[in-house]
Image (cartoon, rainbow, N blue to C red):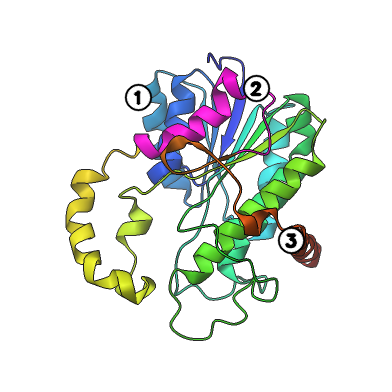
Amino acid sequence: MDLRGRTVLVTGSTGGIGKETARGLAGLGARVLLVGRDAGRAAAAAAEIARSAGNAEVEALTADLLLQRDVRDLARRVRERTDRLHALVNNFGVLDPCLPPTEEGLEATFAANVLTPFTLTNLLLPLLREGRGRVVNVTGGIPGGAIDPDNLQGEKIRVGWTFSQYNHAKTALMAMSHEMAGRLAGTGVTVNVVYPGHGNTPGNQGLPMSSFPRAYRPVVPLLRVLGPFVLSDLAKPARAAVRLASDAGFEGVTDVYIGPGGRRTPWPESVRDPRARAAVWSLCERLGDHTAG
């Protein structure tokens, strides 16, 4: 699909799968607003993508998306740059067992992976409505397990943090997205979720052994040796997000989960549970209000 004349925003796009998503959309002619936490890295990524894609309309924006105040400021700057948004790819996420609570007092994994896309999407809804925009939320880890409304911010995890809170947050992201798609039905804004698969990303490379479930730890050294060879093409896991954000076949299609292998996949049972969706949505609203001052 030719995206010339269309504006897209991709978060977490200075490296890894997010960067390749931004590159893919720039290659289709879109004006790409790229977001990263470090100004120098974001500017370098934007310049590289502009060169490789042959598209000068790649712009770097800086924000620490762990912080709700930065999310709000980013939305303000996007509104200053465009009057419509044709796609928002919420790729930013965090998988780091050592992160303390954010400056705003929020559990970092939930804040990054669920609350940030919730807040940013809602703040940009006027632009998305004008552009009949597509919201693409990127899940990860091993999503689809049970959602515990009493453990959304890792309240029950005290020691031995592994992937559990990350997987839980990414499942909660899916529940939030499923709920948002229903709430926005008929507005022209579509909301879908994509599971990109695994890649040899900087985030994955830096994970300590303690982050992995004990059952997986014996094979982690082998995966780290093979990763640069078998998972080096990060453009491959980015394709599904690029497709959801651009392909004419997804025009007007909403409330879809593109699972492993790029296939349309039924929502997990936990994500379909209205009580779980309500709990996630309510917490996002409450935390967003809590940090709005």
Residue ID at (56%, 17%): 3
1 lies left or right of 232: right
- Most foreground residue, 165 or 271: 271
Residue 116 % position (x, y): 64, 54
Position of 273 relative to 47 (above/below): below
Dot 1, how many residues are within 10 Å of its Cα: few (below 14), some (14-19), or many (20+)?
few
Q: Nearer the viewer, mark 3 or mark 1?
A: 3
Residue ID at (53%, 50%): 139
Residue ID at (62%, 63%): 111
Write down the residue under mark 2: 251
Give the CA distance from mark 2 to mark 3.
28 Å
> Which disc number belongs to residue 52?
1
* Quadrant the C terminus occupies: bottom right
- Was residue 185 drawn as part of the magenta stretch in this picture? no
> Which disc number belongs to residue 284?
3
N-terminal of the pair, mark 1 or mark 2, is: 1
Give the CA distance from mark 3 to mark 1.
38 Å
Tell me the SS state at disc 3: helix
Range covered by the magenta-colored residues: 235-256
